[in-house]
Amino acid sequence: SCPPAPDHLAHAFARLSAHETEEAKRAADAAEWKRKIAEQREQEDARYAQQVADFCQRTRVLEQQQREAKSAADKAHAQRIEEGDARLAKELQETENEAANQRRRQEAGIAALEQFRRETEAAARARAQEREREDARYALELAEADRQAAATAER
């Protein structure tokens, strides 16, 4: 068997054993701290993941509400455009009808003016022909008077 260890060796072994015990305790404390930190990180990660999920859900709800609001606004806008188009079409039809009526009135006026012009020209031609006949009759009467005067002068 081994001879008994000298005191300084026993003391060194005791110190080594105490040191190993202290190291083991430190390692156990460090492992416990690592476990607690890992657990805390997992909880924080889970909390963060839940916050992200909640945010995504709120975002989806808001996006759906925005799509619904936009759809309603688009429908209202389209309806206003249709109403405006119908109003404009009615106004255009009224304007076209008024323009057609005005055109018919103008055409009737032009036709009346043309008729008046034709009648005036015909009357002017008739007066001119009447004057020509009167002038011819007057010229004949004048010629007859001149002839009678010449015949009287010869006698």
Image: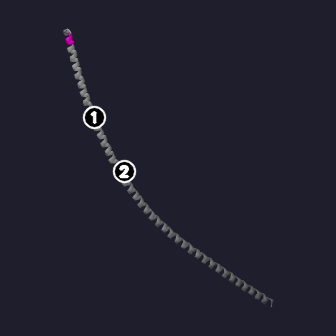
Image coords of residue 110 (percent x, y):
56, 72
Taking depth in this image into account, of 3 and 123 the one nearest to the observer is 3
Taking depth in this image into account, of 90 and 76 the one nearest to the observer is 76
**Considering the image in quadrants, where does the C terminus appear?**
bottom right
Q: Give the range drawn in magenta.
A: 8-12
Kind of residue at badge 2: Arg
**Considering the image in quadrants, where does the N terminus appear?**
top left
Element at badge 2?
A: helix
Q: Where, by quadrant of the figure, is residue 82 drawn?
A: bottom left
Residue 42: image tag: 1
94 vs 13, left or right, is right
Image coords of residue 45 (percent x, y):
29, 36
Q: Where, by quadrant of the figure, is residue 117 drawn?
A: bottom right
Q: Where, by quadrant of the figure, is residue 91 drawn?
A: bottom left
Taking depth in this image into account, of 111 and 28 the one nearest to the observer is 28
Mark 1 packing: few (<14 Cα in 10 Å), some, or many (20+)? few
For the point 26% across and 32% down, which residue is it? Answer: 39
Element at badge 1?
A: helix
- Residue identified by numbered label 2: 67
Q: Do the residues labelled 1 and 2 touch (CB within 8 Å)?
A: no
For the point 22% across and 17% down, which residue is it? Answer: 19
Kind of residue at badge 1: Glu
Instruction: State the CA–CA distance, disc 1 to disc 2.
Output: 37 Å
**Colour option used:** one colour
For the point 29% across and 40% down, which residue is it? Answer: 50
Q: Is residue 23 magenta?
A: no
State the residue lying farthest toward the right: 154
State the residue lying farthest toward the front: 1
For the point 31% across and 42% down, which residue is it? Answer: 53
